Amino acid sequence: MGGETKRSMVPTTSASYPQLAERPKGKLIHNLYVDRLGQFTDGGQYRAQGLLDKLYDGRLAGDDNVKLHVWSAPGQSRPTFEEATSKKNEYRQTHVGESFGPSWTTHWFRVQFKLPMEWTEKPQVELHWDSNSEAMVWTEDGKPLQGLTGGGERTEWVVPDKWRVPDKEHTLYIEMACNGMFGNPPGDVIQPPEMNRYFQLAMADIVSVNVEARALFYDYWIIGDAAREFPQDSWQEHQALQVCNEIIDCFIAGEGSQTCIKECRRIAKRFLGSEIDSEAVYDNENNGTEPAIVNAIGNCHIDTCWLWPWDETKRKIARSWSNQCDLLDRYPEHRFVASQAQQFKWLEQLYPYAWDRVKEHIKKGNFQTIGGSWVEHDTNLPSGESLVRQFLYGQRFFESRFGERCQTFWLPDTFGYSTQLPQICRLAGMTRFFTQKLSWNNINKFPHTTFNWVSLDGSQVICHMAPCETYTADAHFGDVKRSVTQHKSMDQDATSLLPFGKGDGGGGPTFGMLEKLRRCRGMANTVGLLPKVKVAESVDDFFDRIERKVAERETELVTWYGELYFELHRGTYTTQANNKRNNRKAEVLLHDIEYLATLATIKGDKGYKYPKKEIDFMWEAVLLCQFHDCLPGSVIHMCVDDSNKLYAQVSEKGEKALHGALNALGFDTDKQNAFYQDQYVLLQTLGWQRQPPNRMTVRCQASVEQVADNVFVLENPALAVTVEGGVITSLYDRKARREVVAKGSKANQLVIYDDKPLYWQAWDVEVFHLRSRKELRSSSQTTITSTSPERVSVSTTTKISEKSWIKTTISLSALAGSDEPAMVETEAEVEWHETMKFLKVEFPTTITNTEASYETQFGIIRRPTHYNTSWDMAKFEVCCHKWADLSEHGYGVSVLNESKYGFATAGNVMRLSLLRAPKAPDATADMGRHHIRWAIMPHIGGLDERTVRAGYEFNYPPRVHKHSTPERIQELMGAFKLVPGSDPGLVVDTVKRGEDDEDAGNGDMPPRKGRHVVLRVYDSLGGLCRGYVAFGPVGVKKAWKCNLLEDELEEVKLTDKGLPVELRAFEVASYKLLLE
Ligand SMILES: [Zn+2]
């Protein structure tokens, strides 16, 4: 044996290690000791023996200590503070235990209390108010201080230190709203509200807080989570369990005394570090330690309407944001972001004190504006121009009030994302986009967290979808953990956002959330394993870092091209049909007003003023109604009433503004006449010269003939349509010499489906509804209802059920010229009283293609017509705008609609969605009478500008008015149209006056010298496009390409043909023209 080592043969022991075992000691039985943890802080049978009983060391309750008087506002009124505290209102005595209601009523309480001498030294005194409803604390002189949620949530208001005067009676007011944070649901949150709910005042106490016990509560919570949620193969999990059990043992040994509570905290800090009691816990960011990768940011997702009406939202905003101002004062690290310019505007108008408070914090930088849009809007349904205005109105509001625009588009909760958003964001000054809703997909998991999202035109933004998969996180240990475990873009960048705070009536982040975050960070600093979380300086900061990394090529983000299709809530393309119709009509009306009013300010009567105030009112109303529950139709009936009222105002003001512009242009608006006579002029508001609705002068007339029992043939020179039993059995294209309707099938066939999604009724139509397809058969003989040479029609009534019917009128028109595309139009009148049914109309075609095309904002989106993969299958119901198209080489069929958005193309069958009948959250959704229009337009050749233009013309009513000098006005209406020979894919969509023109601005921003016209032009077909925009008799001095916010980007040299335009595929361009 070589290499001998010298080994002592004498056993050695340390002095203290006993030679003999003292007693048996067992292994800690893991699950039992984990289960034990609940005993210390849950409210069960051991409550009085645990920590909860120690949280307060004093309580003043009862009529002697807290005097309560109440005044109930009449009906569903929501009086202001001044109105509510008016001397003429009689406040009567009340007490804890009394109930108040019914739903949606308001009750004002006068609360009076005195603090005893010894309480002046207590570290923290709070009012605990729980009316099981939302409420707001006001000072005696009318300052709104803080919101309360009720039902055990956010029930505390901290009594200010300056109120700690012994024996002085303090008075405050509490405005109690008879609704919870989700309105008044009868249990199941999406069911229509219960209208007769009463809310019991359960607590009105003044309490002294045991701050050490409260701190221990959060220490223990987070360490307990580590014991439960860390993997069992980590030493940290075992240590967390030991620490928690030690804390319980210590508390028991010390009988819950204040001394032992302090000792328990010392034990906790072994695991959490010593700095968890202040923002100092976040300080070690820059001293060489691992960086914090989880960026917590406070927010409060307030749905502008949903399960409550707009007027309640206005109070939710004041309550929630006041809470945050208070919290920002108490927690220096706290940062809070708020979006939706409309919500800020309401606060500005209704709550001057809260508004000033918010403004002050915005100045300090801890209350941060975000989003850049007017509301957090739907992105499927609004038109391209509406999306533009969301940002134009939003960014202008933020800039005018706070001196800055937003850099991040913030839209956590909308139902799918239009493919043109990245381009529109970039043009609105935003390079980043935050959302998370795709985590709700119920078929495919979206594969990225941080990525480049690319528009139809190639524009990109950095998109981040929070890996915690919520925008209302409670800032739990698990939220921090999931920010890493569910992060799908770690290869590119490991950082993430953690948006925390209670949404809607919950009032945003709570102090408890901030306490938990400090402890999560303390734990990461001390024992590791949990990713390091910090409270982000700002969302912009978070994105700045990634953007820099990308710009400097330190990382290359993966890309996602095209729409972010949401695999859920597909019913929202159809639900609440009238909302959608009102939206489309308002968009059309605003378009025409802006064009004609622009012309009127240039060549109209002297003294005519651009109706900027009316236009702003109308746009702000339309944008408000595009909120992501309103236009999609996922609201209670009260909200539908709200939006109906607003749409009615839009329509009334709009017609007035339109007539004002027409009168200024010399039109006689008293007589509108569809018949074209010498002095009648068709208003040319679209980007091309449309044909006058004058069919009398042409020979290409239409005819109708009954050829057999209940069989009719409608004909014009282009098409022959056979209507049999009310449906189209043949649509023959005479020029193409081909049949359009698939052999043996029926176009214009109405079909009905059973429509019971898994849960979200108004929101969802689920894939299995397709199995219940049932054809509806006509219940009447078809009759000829029009035989004029310019238009022939046949009408058929179809019974849907005992209560519902639909009358369809199929028409064929004469053609003005041989080039005009011919279409078969249908007008339907529906009386609809169904329950959970879905009505659609089908067009089986003779077209073969694996992809169909749909109009989307400023472009076309292509989607599969098959179900090859689960991603294809998921798109069984999609959103389109004015048309959908199925084309093969050389031929195609477009289906136009007037105010519909839901569509499906499966194989060769195109299917337009007409009406749904969900019963929650609005039991009356879509019940009643509807008027619907659609058209089938076959075309020789592929999809091109004929469909794009027909879509516009089908939606823009041809307006004809009398004018004394038709030639002159027609020449003027030639202004801002494309010069012949321009690429037909180009569309001049919007013509408006410059936002800050001296004679046409609203004064929000400093006026600019000169008069400007702004044009929005886009490529509608997807290819490089060139052309010129003519000015007609309008003198233009200078032109610039500008962004959507109308900042000049570069000068464009004018030519004698007008404004030269060159756009890349699907580009949206804005031009600003300085008038002579
Ligand atoms: Zn929402």
Image: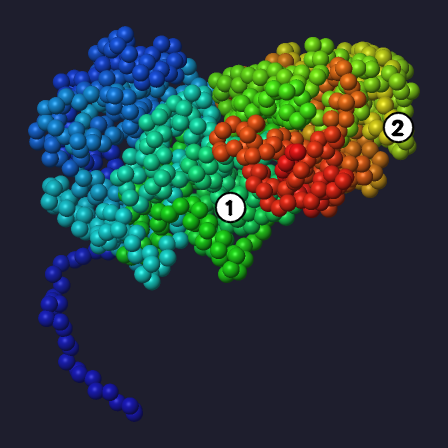
Asked if residue 43 lies left or right of residue 103, the reply is left
User: Residue 936, image x and y in percent?
Assistant: 77, 27
Taking depth in this image into account, of 219 and 1012 the one nearest to the observer is 1012
Tell me which residue sits at (34%, 37%) in the image.
361
User: Residue 827, image x and y in percent?
Assistant: 73, 18
Q: Residues within 10 Å of mark 1 (few under 14, many from 20)?
A: many
Q: Do we see residue 862 in this rendering?
A: no
In the rendered image, the quadrant that contains the C terminus is top right
Tell me which residue sits at (13%, 63%) in the image.
21
Q: Secondary structure at mark 1?
A: strand
Asked if residue 586 lies left or right of residue 313, the reply is right
In the rendered image, the quadrant that contains the N terminus is bottom left
Measure the alpha-carbon separation of dots 2 and 1: 49 Å
Taking depth in this image into account, of 395 and 14 the one nearest to the observer is 395
Tell me which residue sits at (43%, 38%) in the image.
403
> What's the residue type where badge 2 is placed?
Ser
Asked if residue 32 lies left or right of residue 963, the reply is left
User: Residue 53, image x and y in percent?
Assistant: 18, 34
Q: Secondary structure at mark 2?
A: loop
Tell me which residue sits at (20%, 31%) in the image.
160
Q: Is residue 334 above or below residue 1012?
A: below
User: Residue 289, image x and y in percent?
Assistant: 33, 61
| Color scheme of the displayed model | rainbow
> What's the residue type where badge 1 is placed?
Arg
User: What label does residue 432 carry, if any?
Assistant: 1
User: In terms of image quadrants, where is residue 37?
Assistant: top left
User: What label does residue 818 carry, if any?
Assistant: 2
Q: Residue furthest left?
A: 117
Q: Residues within 10 Å of mark 2 (few under 14, many from 20)?
A: few
